[in-house]
Amino acid sequence: MKRLLFFIRHGQTTWNVEHRLPGQFPGIELTDTGQEQAKRLAQALSVLPLSAIISSPSDRATETARYLVEGRSLSIQLEPDLMDIELGHWSGQDRDELSKSDSVWKAFLRNPLVAPEDVETFPQVEQRAVAAVERWLKKESTGAYPAFVTHADVIKLLIAHYLGLEAGRARSLIIDNASVSIVELGAEDQPRVLTVSWSPQPGWLQPSFLLQMRTEH
């Protein structure tokens, strides 16, 4: 059975605007712009028969997921292993200031395979995120078109995994707020990354796989 996996990043947050590193810090909400982004994305995806909405438990992810479930007979299912990268003592700090003054932070940006003790490495994040997706795919209730609402680094690493890339190379990917990245999984074929970091624009979601989905449902 072929499956389409929809990896969705949350909408813009106040900390995104302020260039503060969120990590797994609680209570970070969407801005008004972020809410509008999430609404537009939900409207664009309304043409698709999403079969499950699985979200990181962070506030910014679940707030985005709420727009996706509107008008669908689905509930938000939480997955802790889709949480953002744990940044330890860097959480809440200004990214720009760290880039000027913290040599360890700058080294981590260059090589996220190595990190301080209280910070996750990219391979650690990749391992838990891939394991989470695979657990959900084993559940019959997940269906063929699940959406996973999560965070930029998590999506980068999931994309790298399905492309067969080493985790460190994921840092070169850019995942925008309220964007969707789509991976096709076949029973025998290699995974195919169909879309990376697409945001809803008029007519953007018209590739051949959409026509196929319409004929199946």
Image (spheres, helix red, strand yellow):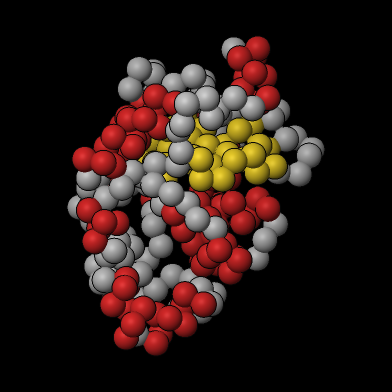
Q: Position of residue 3 (x, y in %)?
A: 64, 31
Residue for point 31% across, 73% down: 96
- Tell me what residue is drawn at x 49 percent, y 62 percent: 125
Left or right of 15, for residue 210? right
Q: Residue at x 61, y 56 (%)?
A: 160
Residue 25 shows in this picture? no
Residue situated in front as seen by the camera: 80 or 63: 63
- The picture quadrant where one finds residue 64 is top left
The single residue placed furthest to the right in the displayed view is 188
**Vertical side of 191 occupied by 130: above or below:** below
Q: Residue furthest front?
A: 202
Circle count = 0
In the displayed structure, does residue 78 sit left or right of residue 205? left
38 sits left or right of 147 in the view: left
Q: Quadrant of the C terminus?
A: top right
Residue 141 percent location from the top left of the image: 51, 27
- At which x and y percent is residue 187? 75, 35
Up the image or down, 65 lies above or below 43; here it is below
- Looking at the image, residue 2 lies above or below residue 80: above
Q: Of 193 and 135, which appears nearest the observer? A: 193
Q: Quadrant of the N terminus?
A: top right
- Residue 46 visible: yes
Is 78 in front, or is 145?
145
Residue 169, horizontal then vertical, whole percent:
61, 66
- Name the residue rendered at 58%, 69% in the picture: 168
Write down the quadrant of residue 139 in the picture: top right
Question: Does residue 208 sit above or below 125 in this rendering?
Answer: above
Does residue 9 appear to the left or right of 112 in the view shown? left
